[in-house]
Image (cartoon, rainbow, N blue to C red):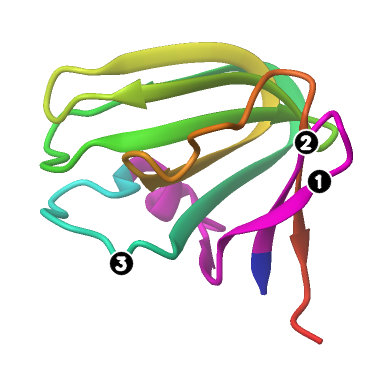
């Protein structure tokens, strides 16, 4: 599985090829806590299946993260969060955590989709 960014001008690029899903409540609560580094092609996807305000905190996360909030695969917010202190919130049905800097160029209104490897 890979995470693909589709810019407003139609260009596509792969953001991550090492994609995990936070499927359980426990996985969603823990997220990337305790991680001090991530592979540059890594993404953790939190799919909630319904729209609500989704907040992210960086307590016990020791590496910067780019967080992309999505609503129906459309980017609603992108934010780089600092270790231990960063927070963010947006109305979304899904968000994705990536290594800091991995979401450079991703803008609100763009698309981000999960695709199966072919």
Label 3 crowd (10 A; few <14 / some 14-19 / many >=20): few
In this figure, which residue is indicated by the disc labeled 1?
11
Q: Secondary structure at mark 1?
A: loop
Residue drawn 51% across the image and 66% down it: 20
Tell me whether circle 3 and circle 2 mark residues in contact (CB < 8 Å).
no
Quarter residue 29 falls in: top left
Label 2 crowd (10 A; few <14 / some 14-19 / many >=20): some
Label 1 crowd (10 A; few <14 / some 14-19 / many >=20): few
- On the rendered structure, is 26 left or right of 22? left
- Residues under labels 1 and 2: Cα distance? 5 Å
Identify whether 8 is placed above or below 118.
Answer: above
- Residues under labels 1 and 3: Cα distance? 24 Å
Query: What segment carries the magenta color?
Result: 3-29
Residue 4 located within the stretch drawn in magenta: yes
In this figure, which residue is indicated by the disc labeled 3?
39
Frontmost of labels 1 and 3 is: 1
Which residue occupies the foreground of this view, 58 or 26?
Answer: 58
Residue drawn 67% across the image and 74% down it: 1
Q: Position of residue 53 (x, y in %)?
A: 60, 13
Which residue occupies the foreground of this view, 91 or 82?
Answer: 82
Tell me whether circle 1 and circle 3 mark residues in contact (CB < 8 Å).
no
Q: Name the image quarter holding the C terminus.
A: bottom right
Which mark is on residue 36? none
Tell me whether circle 1 and circle 2 mark residues in contact (CB < 8 Å).
yes
């Amino acid at each position: 599985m890979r995470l693909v960014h589709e810019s407003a001008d139609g260009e596509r690029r792969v953001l991550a090829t090492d994609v995990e899903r936070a499927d359980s409540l426990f996985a969603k609560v823990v997220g990337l806590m305790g991680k001090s580094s991530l592979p540059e092609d890594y993404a953790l996807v939190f799919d909630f299946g319904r729209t609500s305000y989704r907040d992210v905190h960086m307590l016990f996360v020791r590496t910067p993260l780019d967080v992309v909030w999505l609503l129906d695969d459309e980017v609603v917010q992108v934010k780089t969060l600092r270790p231990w202190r960063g927070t963010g919130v947006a109305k979304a049905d899904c968000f994705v955590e990536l290594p800091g800097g991995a979401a450079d160029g991703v803008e609100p209104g763009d698309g981000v989709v999960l695709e199966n490897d072919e």
